[in-house]
C-alpha cells in the first residue's frame, strides 16, 4: 500500500469519529478540542508534504485538511440552519425533514471539494 494512501486513511479517521458524534460539537469545549486536533493534523500534513518527493503527496495533505474544513463548515451551516428553521439539523440516513438532506449534502461535498479548491486557489494566487 502506498504511504500516501495510508496517511490519508489515518488523517480521515478523526473525521469519521466526529461524524458519528456531531451533536456533541455544540459544546464549545468539545468543539475547541476537535479544532485543536484538526490544526495539529494540518500541521502534520504540511510537514509530510514538504518532506515528500512523491507525486501523490497532495493526497495525504488533502486528508489532513478534511477534519478542519468539516468542523468549520458544520459550524457555519449549523448556525445558518438554526437561524432559518429554529431547530438543530439532523444528519443521518432518514432525517425527519427532507431539508436536512441539503444540510448533509453541503457538509459532505464541501468537506471533499474545499481542500482541492483552496489548494488550487493558493497555488494560482502565489505561484
Image: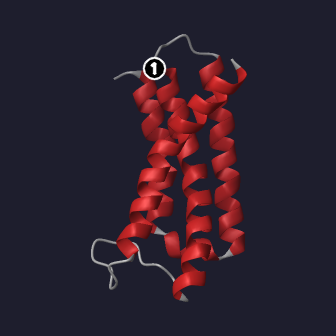
Q: Percent from the top left, x then y, of residue 17?
A: 47, 59
Q: How is the image coloured?
A: secondary structure
Above or below for 29 versus 4: below
Q: Is residue 58 visible?
A: yes
Question: 87 or 47: nearer the eye?
Answer: 87
Residue pointed to by mark 1: 56
Question: 3 or 82: nearer the eye?
Answer: 82
Which image quadrant is residue 5 in?
top left
Secondary structure state at the residue bearing disc 1: loop
Q: Is residue 87 visible?
A: no
Above or below for 121 versus 29: above
Residue drawn at (46%, 62%), measured in percent from left and top?
Answer: 19
Image quadrant occupied by the C terminus? top right
Residue drawn at (39%, 61%), measured in percent from left and top?
Answer: 105
Which image quadrant is residue 28 in?
bottom right
Task: Left or right? Give the position of 31 relative to 89.
Answer: right
Q: Percent from the top left, x then y, of residue 95?
A: 33, 79
Kindly give the residue lying farthest to the left in the view shown: 94
Which image quadrant is residue 43 in?
top right
Question: 115 or 80: nearer the eye?
Answer: 80
Mark 1 packing: few (<14 Cα in 10 Å), some, or many (20+)? Answer: some
Q: Percent from the top left, x then y, of residue 11?
A: 51, 41
Amino acid at each position: 500500500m502506498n504511504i500516501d494512501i495510508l496517511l490519508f486513511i489515518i488523517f480521515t479517521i478523526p473525521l469519521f469519529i466526529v461524524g458519528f458524534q456531531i451533536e456533541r460539537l455544540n459544546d464549545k469545549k468539545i468543539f475547541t478540542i476537535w479544532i485543536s486536533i484538526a490544526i495539529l493534523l494540518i500541521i502534520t500534513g504540511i510537514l509530510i508534504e514538504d518532506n515528500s518527493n512523491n507525486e501523490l503527496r497532495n493526497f495525504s495533505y488533502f486528508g489532513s485538511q478534511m477534519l478542519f474544513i468539516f468542523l468549520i463548515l458544520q459550524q457555519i451551516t449549523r448556525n445558518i440552519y438554526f437561524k432559518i428553521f429554529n431547530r438543530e439539523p439532523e444528519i443521518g440516513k432518514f432525517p425527519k425533514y427532507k431539508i436536512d438532506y441539503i444540510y448533509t449534502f453541503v457538509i459532505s461535498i464541501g468537506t471533499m471539494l474545499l481542500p482541492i479548491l483552496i489548494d488550487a486557489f493558493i497555488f494560482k494566487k502565489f505561484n
